[in-house]
């Protein structure tokens, strides 16, 4: 009869490494004009970052070689539940207003439909944390220079009682991954250590 110590792949080690679960995560929105906590608790789905390098062809006599060119990060897609209190919608609305005024004139400054003077005036940070089920952080992604590229408020349907959702497409300048190797119910990675806005 096989025991747990006998499972695994020969020559690669015995035992089974527990996988990360797709439903154990949280998304923090850092530096938004409104409290990002109201978005954090309404997140339903999101994706992890994808990194792509341009390929640069080097043509030679009768062959082609390739080297890596500039890199780019994929958009961050996040789905939120739109709550009856309007807190999630208010946070999205406040951020969109920060990026460009959409709701009339600012009577204090006299500005009408103005944009921010610099991108740093409206950009924020996103921290995606994958948890172990016991509040320890097994992995986290920090996305810097983020702004809302697209906000879709979804449709309504008399024949459905499903929750109303908001889909956000967030563009960001850079991301980096932090791994907490060997996490075993510890406090894990400091959630804000070294975060740059």
Image (cartoon, rainbow, N blue to C red):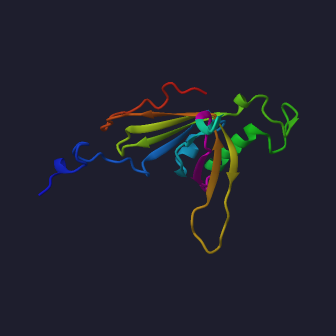
Can you tell which quarter of the image residue 2 is in? Answer: bottom left
| Residue at 40% over, 43% down | 131
Whether residue 72 is in magenta: the answer is: yes
Can you tell which quarter of the image residue 60 is in? Answer: top right
Along the line of sight, the residue nearer the viewer: 58 or 145: 58
Residue 14 lies left or right of residue 52; in this view the side is left
| Residue at 37% over, 38% down | 136
- Residue 3 shows in the view: yes
**How far from the left and from the top, in percent, is residue 82?**
61, 55
| Residue at 85% over, 30% down | 109
**How far from the left and from the top, in percent, is residue 56?**
64, 36
Residue sitting farthest toward the left: 1
Residue 174 lies left or right of residue 188; in this view the side is right
Magenta segment, prevailing SS (helix, strand or loop): strand
Where's the C terminus, which quadrant? top right
**How far from the left and from the top, in percent, is residue 11?**
23, 43
**Count of all numbered marks drawn on residues in the image:** 0
Residue 164 in the image: above or below residue 117: below
Residue 43 lies left or right of residue 13; in this view the side is right
The residue segment tinted magenta is 67-85
| Residue at 33% over, 36% down | 183
Residue sitting farthest toward the bottom: 159
Whether residue 39 is in magenta: the answer is: no
**How far from the left and from the top, in percent, is residue 151?**
69, 50
Where's the N terminus, which quadrant? bottom left
- Residue 30 shows in the view: no
């Amino acid at each position: 009869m096989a025991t747990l110590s006998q499972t695994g792949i020969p020559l690669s080690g015995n035992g089974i490494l527990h996988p990360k679960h797709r439903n154990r995560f949280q998304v923090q929105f850092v530096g938004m004009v409104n409290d990002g906590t109201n978005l954090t608790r309404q997140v339903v789905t999101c994706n992890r970052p994808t990194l792509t390098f341009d390929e640069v062809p080097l043509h030679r006599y009768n062959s082609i070689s390739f080297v890596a060119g500039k890199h780019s990060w994929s958009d961050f897609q996040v789905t939120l539940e739109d709550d009856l209190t309007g807190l999630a919608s208010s946070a999205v609305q406040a951020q969109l207003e920060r990026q460009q005024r959409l709701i009339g004139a600012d009577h204090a400054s006299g500005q009408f439909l103005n944009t921010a003077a610099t991108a740093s005036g409206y950009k924020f940070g996103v921290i995606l944390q994958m948890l172990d089920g016991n509040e320890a952080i097994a992995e986290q992604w920090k996305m810097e220079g983020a702004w809302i590229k697209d906000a879709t408020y979804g449709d309504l349907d008399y024949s459905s009682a499903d929750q109303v959702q908001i889909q956000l497409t967030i563009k960001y300048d850079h991301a980096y991954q932090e791994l907490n190797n060997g996490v075993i119910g510890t406090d894990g990675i400091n959630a804000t250590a070294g975060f740059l806005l």
